[in-house]
Amino acid sequence: MSVLRFSKLIFGSATVFFLIAPLIAILPLAFTDSVFLNYPIPAYSTRWFVELFTAGVWQRSIINSLIIGCGTTVLATFLGTVGALGLRDKQLSLVLTTIKTVFLLPMVVPAVVLGVGMQLMFARYALTNTYLGVIIAHTVVAVPFVVVNVLAVLQGIDRRLEQAAASLGAAPVTVLKQVTLPLALPGIVSGAVFAFATSLDEVVLTLFVAGPNQRTLARQMFSTIRENISPAIAAAAFVFIVGTVLIAIVVNFSRGTKRAKEVR
Amino acid sequence: MNAPRLSKQVISLALVAPLLLFLIVFFALPLVTMMKSAVSDPVAARTLPATARSVSSWNRTSPPTVEMQAAFVADLRQISDDQLFGDLVRRLNSAKSGFRTLMPKTRKAALDTAGSIDLVALDKRWGDISYWQAVSVAASSKITDRNLLAAVDLQRDASGAIASVPADASANKAIMLRTFVMALTVTGACVLIGFPFAMIAASVDGWKRQLLLGAVLLPLWTSLLVRTAAWFILLQDRGLINSVLMQSGVTSSPIPLIFNRAGVIIAMTHVLLPFMVLPIFSVLIGIPKNLMPAAASLGAHPVRAFLNVLLPLGLRGVVSGSLLVFMSALGYYITPALIGGAKDQMISSVIAYYATGAANWGMAGALGLVLLAATMILYAIYLRLSSERETSP
């Protein structure tokens, strides 16, 4: 039995190492003084962070990512939340079940296939090389995450709360505003976070739909890795990884406080 | 259906309508556009209307008639847009090489001289009926199956029968096979690592389980691009892995890990492993904890208990996870594009090349259609399996 436990320990640790180590190993390289991404690091400096936030192309791409990310978050959260409200019943009719499947399809269709189609179609309506076009493209792939997150929370809401509000004379809109949406807020927030993260990380659709003026941070990282790798990549990756961990902590924390409130 | 239920249904439909409309316009329509580009072939029919009419009565084996030649010259005189003419030349040349020089020469003659022209005297290629066959095929229909056939290395020969292209002419079958093999390799690697790992995660609890699951979720939450960048940096000839190997004396010169198949498989396995672990874990966690002790109490050896009890139950998770991983791996673009060499490019890279590099929308659409169909079939199987699980707990 101890052999089994030992091999479990070894295999578990090795896999955790395989999953986590690559992400940790590149963090120190963000602080290298050299122009090469190699260990050992000759001297430490923050020059690549300075480069990331001041060099024209990087700065522009960060601003673009924020514009497009915010646009996508607003559009996807609105469309996804309203759509999820229509799908909240546990016993869905056949039509609504089909619609639910359709809502999740953008997660499945290969990005390159969708990108080719979008480039062809968007060109006809002058949407290529525009911010609106990129926001729409990102919203298509971000919206399933909002639907899934909001739906999960909605299905956990006790319907009697809404029925009670309605029986006390609240109009349906008031019930929605005062009861349903506040209760669904955690799902809406995590859906919005996922939508923003999806937009931030999107490369393939951006390659097909965006022009040079809409070059996002992810797109800029993609071409930097492809053409002339520089430690600015490690600095950008550092920002991404630390940001991810912070968001994970915040989301966990907000869930924790919510639970604590419920207990009280 | 009674009235309250009906009105509820109407409200639900009204709520899903905005997103449904949005996805029809910006998700379904682009896919339809892409599929149409695979079969649409309007340029010759649009630019050569008179020729199209006159070849309709031609049997495609006798020498070209005088009317056909006159109609063709008349059509050429009508084309004023140089870009449109360029599209026509490219279309014809893709069916039969030689049109690239023949067409500008013929057009120049048609524009320079009024009246009828003896095309065969102008260029003896016009006496070759295979050129006329190409013109006739291109002009007589606005849709074509040649892109779809070319996507699977087939073509129509002079008589219109389907035949395979010469072995050296196209590599699409080889690319599909490569995509399939790479996706399968990644899926296999994910099963080998993910299944035992999910079993370990399900067998422990408390902080240990949190740690193991956190290790799966953190990469899942981290940007795909960042993970690919991390592997790019680690796998370089002077990257961390090679420096460690060289300093510990395992190897004296760097092992090539980047721009080859090994690097792509390692990075893709890392990226897709969470999609294998999570479905298996969720199945294993649903198995009652007392099943294994029950098997042991009945005298089963732990290995036999594992093989007969846990493995069959966990296998459903493995199937779901494998479908997810395989489906995602088939359409992968970023990781092979950055970590792979020229010989490790998968079908997505070829589609992207046809679309952005060669502006050959027909081929991009046809290969996209193949990839889309494969993905949709796998997704349908996945949905079927997961709905079966919901109905039979």
Image (spheres, coloured by chain):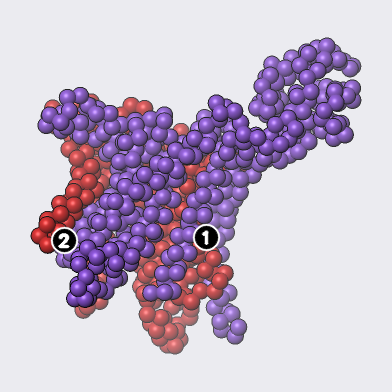
Residue B380 seen from this side: yes
Rendered red, the chain in question is: A
- Taking the spot 44% from the left edge, 64% from the top edge, the residue there is B385
Identify residue type, mark 1. Answer: Val
Q: Are marks 2 and 1 in contact (CB under 8 Å)?
A: no
- Taking the spot 23% from the left edge, 42% from the top edge, the residue there is A22
Judge the density around disc 2: few (<14), some (14-19), many (≥20) Cα neighbours within 10 Å: some
Residue B128, compared with residue A26, is above or below; it is above
Subunit of mark 1?
A: A
For the residue pair A26 and B198, the one nearer the viewer reads as: B198
Identify residue type, mark 2. Answer: Lys
Of all residues, the one furthest to the left in this rendering is: A2
Instruction: Residue under label 1, please give it.
Output: A102
Residue B231, compared with residue B127, is above or below; it is below
- Taking the spot 57% from the left edge, 59% from the top edge, the residue there is B21
Residue A165: quadrant of the picture: bottom left
Residue A126 seen from this side: no
- Taking the spot 54% from the left edge, 56% from the top edge, the residue there is B23
On the image, the x and y values in percent for residue B138 come to 74, 32
The colour chain B appears in is purple
Q: In which quarter of the image is the N terminus of chain A?
A: bottom left
Subunit of mark 2?
A: B
Instruction: Residue under label 2, please give it.
Output: B208
On the image, the x and y values in percent for residue A26 come to 21, 38
On the image, the x and y values in percent for residue B217 come to 27, 55
